[in-house]
Image (tube, helix red, strand yellow):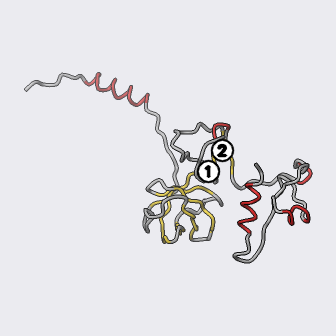
Amino acid sequence: MAELTISTEEIRGALERYISEYTPETAREEVGVVAEAGDGIAQVEGLPSTMSQELLEFEDGTLGVALNLDVREIGVVVLGEFAGIEEGQQVKRTGRVLSVPVGDAFLGRTVDALGNPIDGLGEIEHEAFRELEIQAPNVMNRQPVKEPLQTGIKAIDSMIPIGRGQRELIIGDRKTGKTTIAIDTIINQR
């Protein structure tokens, strides 16, 4: 059997090079545990620094939004397949508030609620992220409404002035045609 012939100086030199090149990296990560799960909501314990509307990541990669911030638990709405979420699973903070990717590349594409493409045309290059819950512009800073919105329903168009770009609320009992009015209005915009 051949004997190793490494001098102590070579070992010392190798160790010194390794030590001089070594830069320790630490990453602080807050991890909680699913205490209860059911109906698309998970109750998570152990994440005291979680922000409202923060995205949380479950063990299987599914994302959730922290909505109900109690002293002991956080109510998390699961934004994906709920079947894999079970008691005892680890959940970690992402540090990101609920936001979606935005950019010109999204024009003409079909995406899910989180901005992921579902049209089979490949990934979408985004320019930035935009938070979902943002402050609405002041009334004085908004563009004025200059054009009427025609619903195509003469009774509504003649009695109720609706401006294109305004938000409107359609209220009524069940089975009274609220959805029909909305769909007819959309179709009439062609």
Q: What element does badge 1 sit on?
A: strand
Residue 52 is situated, as x and y percent measured from the top left of the image, at 65, 60
At label 1, counting other C-alpha atoms closer than 10 Å, the crowd grade (few under 14, some 14-19, many 20 or more) is few
Residue 122 is situated, as x and y percent measured from the top left of the image, at 52, 39
At 74% from the left and 62% from the top, the residue drawn is 182
Please name the amino acid that badge 1 sits on: Arg
Q: Are marks 2 and 1 in contact (CB under 8 Å)?
A: yes
At 58% from the left and 55% from the top, the residue drawn is 55
The correct choice, above or below, for 75 with respect to 59 in the image is below
Residue 180 horizontal side relative to residue 151, left or right: left
Q: What element does badge 2 sit on?
A: strand
Front position in the image: 142 or 120: 120
The correct choice, above or below, for 129 with respect to 45 in the image is above
Which circle's residue, 2 or 1, is located before the other in the chain? 1
Residue 21 horizontal side relative to residue 181, left or right: left
Please name the amino acid that badge 2 sits on: Phe
Q: Which residue is mark 2?
A: 129
Residue 180 is situated, as x and y percent measured from the top left of the image, at 72, 65
Residue 140 horizontal side relative to residue 17, left or right: right
Residue 43 horizontal side relative to residue 103, left or right: left
**Disc 2 from disc 1: Cα separation:** 10 Å
Front position in the image: 50 or 176: 176
At 73% from the left and 70% from the top, the residue drawn is 177
Front position in the image: 57 or 107: 107
Front position in the image: 156 or 85: 156
Q: Residue furthest bottom?
A: 173
Q: Which residue is mark 1?
A: 96
Kindly report which numbered mark, 2 or 1, lies closer to the viewer in this rendering: 2
Q: Quadrant of residue 161?
A: bottom right
At 78% from the left and 68% from the top, the residue drawn is 170
At label 2, counting other C-alpha atoms closer than 10 Å, the crowd grade (few under 14, some 14-19, many 20 or more) is few
Residue 148 is situated, as x and y percent measured from the top left of the image, at 88, 53
